[in-house]
Amino acid sequence: MKPAARSASFAGPFALGTLSAPDGVPFPALVTPDGSVLDLRAALGEHELTIRTLLERWDEAGPRLHVLARDDKAAWQPLLGLRVHAPVEPRQVFQSGANYRQHVIDLEVAHRAPDDPRTAEEAREEIAALMDRRAAEDLPYVFIGLPSAITGPYDDVQLPDWAEKPDWELELAAVIGKPAYRVSTDEALEYVAGYTIANDLTDRATVFRRDMPAIGTDWLRSKNAPGFTPLGPWIVPAESIADPGDLRVTLRLNGETMQDESTKDMLFGVARLVSYISRTSRLLPGDLVLTGSPAGNGIHWGRLLRDGDVMEGSITGLSVQRTRCVSEETGS
């Protein structure tokens, strides 16, 4: 019989996570919505198992996990008291930029040149028309992130002393379940094992190179500090998410709602992103495809992250992550 435990709150009969006892070794876990946990190393008889190696045989593992989730005689333990880590260690992280219509409009209006003769409303209308053409005719904008930037969904986020304008960007992340290379948009979702939550933090002050403007964006500096990508808590299987193009993405800062938008506002959906990336790169099991951030970032509100801030991010069916910002200068 499953033990009484803290609720895990996600869609479907189970999700995957990486957990540990306090100061213990992380282990791959099957988690049920009532907060029951099963150590998959013991349940599957594989001591070296990780979530990533499980994803490497996702087609075979999926049915077995369904059986385990219904097994009341398995060695269940409560989630309460366990540490929740990032659910997977990816080899590759692909990040989509400028992928939410309203977000791009807000950023373009906020960053227009001081001598731009257009009013804010005129600029907004022109950029909106451009976004509509881009969605119909253009290609996604994708760049590479570093796995070393990933941290757990409840870990503190250290703000580097050089980051002048640290900002939040809550995003839906697709988790790849089998190698994908040159796959079509129609078949792309077959390669997605599940979905999770990512907060793709960005230092707005270092997005653009000041010394060499012609080079453009500097994603290494602005997005890849240690801990700048809180991930999780869970990987919810794709079959439990009816439509990744119709999920609510919500971020609250110190209890105040800052982002609250549907993935319907994406210019390029998950299938188009996966297909586009696979035209150039071979996607591998466990890889992440971050789908971009909706409107409502700190640059929009004129309020960037600072020491002591608490971010709470949720996406429909994927549960909630909660992280606290800690200044590198204070170490508090």
Image: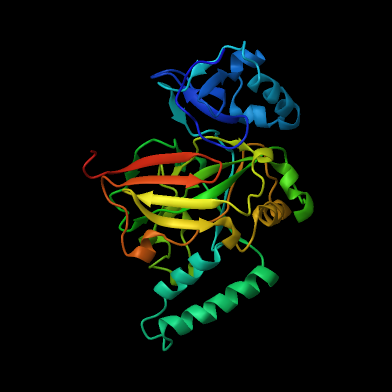
Left or right: 312 in relation to 325:
right
Left or right: 297 in relation to 317:
left
Residues 52 and 76: in front is 76
Image point (72%, 47%), residue name? 189
Residue 261 point in image, percent of width and height: 50, 58
Left or right: 177 in relation to 211:
right
Asked which quadrant contains residue 280, the reply is bottom right
Name above or below for residue 170 compared with residue 135: above
Image point (44%, 82%), residue name? 121
Residue 31 point in image, percent of width and height: 56, 26
Name the residue at the left extreme: 330
Number of dots carrying numbers? 0
Name above or below for residue 217 compared with residue 28: below
Quadrant (top left/top right/bottom left/bottom right) for the N terminus: top right
Q: Is residue 233 visible?
A: yes
Residue 239 point in image, percent of width and height: 69, 39
Image point (38%, 35%), residue name? 155
Name above or below for residue 256 compared with residue 90: below
Residue 117 point in image, percent of width and height: 41, 89
Q: Is residue 293 visible?
A: no
Image point (62%, 73%), residue name? 132
Residues 207 and 209: in front is 207
Name above or below for residue 312 compared with residue 32: below
Name the residue at the bottom extreme: 117
Quadrant (top left/top right/bottom left/bottom right) for the C terminus: top left
